[in-house]
Amino acid sequence: WGLPRTIEELRLDDNRISTIAEVSLQDLTNLKRLVLDGNLLNNNGLGERVFMNLINLTELSLVRNSLTSPPANLPGTNLRKLYLQENHMNYVPPNAFADLTQLYRLDMSTNNLTSLPQGIFDDLDNLTQLFMRNNPWYCGCKIKWVRDWLQSLPSKVNVRGLMCQAPERVRGMTIKDLNTELFDCRDRSDVNTIQVTTTTMLNTLLPAQGQWPVPVTKQPEIKPPDLSKVYRTTPIPVRKIITINVKSTTVDTIHIYWKLALPMTALRLSWLKMGHSPVFGSITETIVTGDRTEYLLTALEPESPYRICMVPMETSNIYLSDETPVCIETETSPLKMHNPTTTLNRE
């Protein structure tokens, strides 16, 4: 390309670049920021070692391309920001982020990820911002390690978007909130046997058999998911902490009000429309302060079912010992009537 070797920032966003040869960037050893957003790049179009010589690169952005996994051989010496959102990624290799010890911001939002390999973040010693919104996370046994990892993080690490889209019984809950039994980890031999036969199903966003909450049989067999089954509540702990009431006040609003048995600093509130395939952006979450007792959901769809979940939080994003969310389902009102108030106790 004839670029000067002293260049420190290169923006090639919103072109129609589909291929970058390995030699194209090899001499740009002073480059600190490279933006390749909005192109036609896929994994085959990027040379395997195309980024390796960029030893001073601190920011790499590949937003709005056609990658199916993170690019190989990322420069680990100084890379601090990596943006991979709005691609087609459905797989992350176990060593994708190996040696990226300086990386503190990673964004893989709006892709097609359902799970992550265990230990994928082990080398990211300086990670403080991780954004994974708008991915169809399947909260089966394979993702339980993510829950454990999230709960071990220091308060300085900000993680957003790890929210279950399937199976239906945990849809709308954040992964960090799930109790162990909700992952439905059965005998590992059964899980492994069935997972082998359902690999292609995962790629099409169908739930993996052996993780769906169906009755256990003596011999593993493939059963279609019962999408008609409605799960009204999550497992109820022994000790009452939150009582939630919801009421549809208009055709597009739901009034939520609650009582707390214990004082707390904040609560996480999430809601989503039920009864349709996962849609990116369908789940919304917010943090409400502990002194509040009500919240009004607005701009909802008329005569539509919604799942609403709450989980208590303490300061610094550290959860109470009881991490099971309280979830409830209700509907917005039709045009000429309102639904009755629904009450759910955690007890």
Image (spheres, helix red, strand yellow):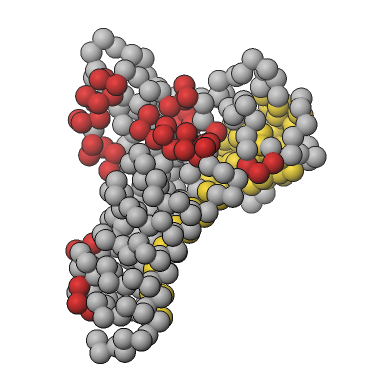
Q: Quadrant of residue 3?
A: bottom left
Image: 20 above or below 319: below
In the displayed structure image, the side of residue 175 where residue 335 appears, left or right: right
Q: Residue at x 29, y 12 (%)?
A: 217
Image: 125 above or below 207: below
Q: Is residue 198 visible?
A: yes
Q: Position of residue 174 (x, y in %)?
A: 52, 38
User: Quick one: quadrant of the C terminus?
Assistant: top right
- Check the image and name the residue furthest to the right: 291
User: Quick one: quadrant of the N terminus?
Assistant: bottom left
Q: Quadrant of residue 251?
A: top right
Q: Is residue 83 visible?
A: no
Image: 202 above or below 217: below
Q: Residue at x 61, y 18 (%)?
A: 237
- Check the image and name the residue furthest to the top: 218
Q: Residue at x 57, y 44 (%)?
A: 154
Q: Residue at x 57, y 37 (%)?
A: 306
Q: Position of residue 140 (x, y in %)?
A: 39, 31
